[in-house]
């Protein structure tokens, strides 16, 4: 068990503080301040932008609060990574390749997209280094194409797999789907971190944070993709600027949420710091499964897969 003041925990706390501070500052200056200072109107562009501003503010503040509680709890209780013992397969090679494909495309899109959005600030330096705005845009569009291919492949592959199992009369559960139990588990986990519940919830194959991450990514892709195509074809002023608002606001939400929620939950919390290698190896130790996904481990043991 680690001390709350072990090097690992201090590094995790410092990184969380820095990233959260950057995200919070970005939120205040680019979301909250414009929301409070822009005159109210009944125009659709204003209302759509206001919706995104409220959504971004609420989700990012929740992520900082939730992960702050998690950080304090894990550090105070000396939660450590348990890598000894037999390995349990979590993700196959296909899934790991998709994750790397997703991460790489998203990173390129974020850098090239925000370089254009913040051209008058830091973006000009990056775009000039790349050889100009046209090249930057070409790279952005190429990355978007690769990401679009991934989305089509992802849902086609798993839909075909699901339908094939149903056709053979085999069980075809969808553990990634969000249900009422996830809301219950989220509330129980917050209570547990606050000391108001004796036990933490027991998770199956995915916990509520992982499900939220998954569906947030693909919901966000739809919101980004359709307006992105319109922007590419007709420019930023078409339809009173609505595609531009959808595209840029959703991009900001996606990047901020990745920084303050996904990366903390997956890599930067005291248990996993500095990096969780499951996206490379595809496995967790049996002890890790017992800690993080006990119901899934029980299922695998029952069918002889663990």
Image (cartoon, grey):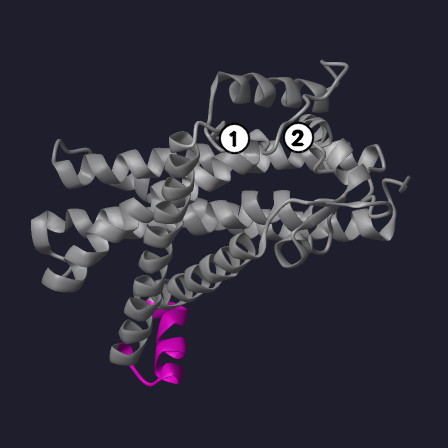
Which residues make up the magenta segment?
119-133
Judging by the rendered image, the residue that carries numbered circle 2 is: 296
**In the image, residue 138 above or below residue 289:** below
Do the numbered discs 1 and 2 sit on residues whose CB atoms are within 8 Å?
yes
Q: Nearer the viewer, residue 146 or 126?
A: 146
Q: Nearer the viewer, residue 14 or 199?
A: 199
**What is the x, y in percent for residue 231?**
17, 59
Residue 131 magenta: yes
> In the displayed structure, does residue 122 sit left or right of residue 39?
right
Q: Quadrant of the C terminus?
A: top right
- Which residue is rendered at x = 58% and y = 34% of the image? 206
**What is the x, y in percent for residue 228?**
23, 56
Residue 87 magenta: no
Residue 32 appears in the figure: no
Judging by the rendered image, the residue that carries numbered circle 1 is: 175
Question: Regarding mark 2 in the picture, which secondary structure is present there?
Answer: helix
Hey, which residue is sitting farthest front in the picture? Answer: 168
> In the displayed structure, does residue 285 sit left or right of residue 138?
right
Q: Which mark is residue 3?
A: none
**In the image, residue 282 above or below residue 179:** below
């Amino acid at each position: 068990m680690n001390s709350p003041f072990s090097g690992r925990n201090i590094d995790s706390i410092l990184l969380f503080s820095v990233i959260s501070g950057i995200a919070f500052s970005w939120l205040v200056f680019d979301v909250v301040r414009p929301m409070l200072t822009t005159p109210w109107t009944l125009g659709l562009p204003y209302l759509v932008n206001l919706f995104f501003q409220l959504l971004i503010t609420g989700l990012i503040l929740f992520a900082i609060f939730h992960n702050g509680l998690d950080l304090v709890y894990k550090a105070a209780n000396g939660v450590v990574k348990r890598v000894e013992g037999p390995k349990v397969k979590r993700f196959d090679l296909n899934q790991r390749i998709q994750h790397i494909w997703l991460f790489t495309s998203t990173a390129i899109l974020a850098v090239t997209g925000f370089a254009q959005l913040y051209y008058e600030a830091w973006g000009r330096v990056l775009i000039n280094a790349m050889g100009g705005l046209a090249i930057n845009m070409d790279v952005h569009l190429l990355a978007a194409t690769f990401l679009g291919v991934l989305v089509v492949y992802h849902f086609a592959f798993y839909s075909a797999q699901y339908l094939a199992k149903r056709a053979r009369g085999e069980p075809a559960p969808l553990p990634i789907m969000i249900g009422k139990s996830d809301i219950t588990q989220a509330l129980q986990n917050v209570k547990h971190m606050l000391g108001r519940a004796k036990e933490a919830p027991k998770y199956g194959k995915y916990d509520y944070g992982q499900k939220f991450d998954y569906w947030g990514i693909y919901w966000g892709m739809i919101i980004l993709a359709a307006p992105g195509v319109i922007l590419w074809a007709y420019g930023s002023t078409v339809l009173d600027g609505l595609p531009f608002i959808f595209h840029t606001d959703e991009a900001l939400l996606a990047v901020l949420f990745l920084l303050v929620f996904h990366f903390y939950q997956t890599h930067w919390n005291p248990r996993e710091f500095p990096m969780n290698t499951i996206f490379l190896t595809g496995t967790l130790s049996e002890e890790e499964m017992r800690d993080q996904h006990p119901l899934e481990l029980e299922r695998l043991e029952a069918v002889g897969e663990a």
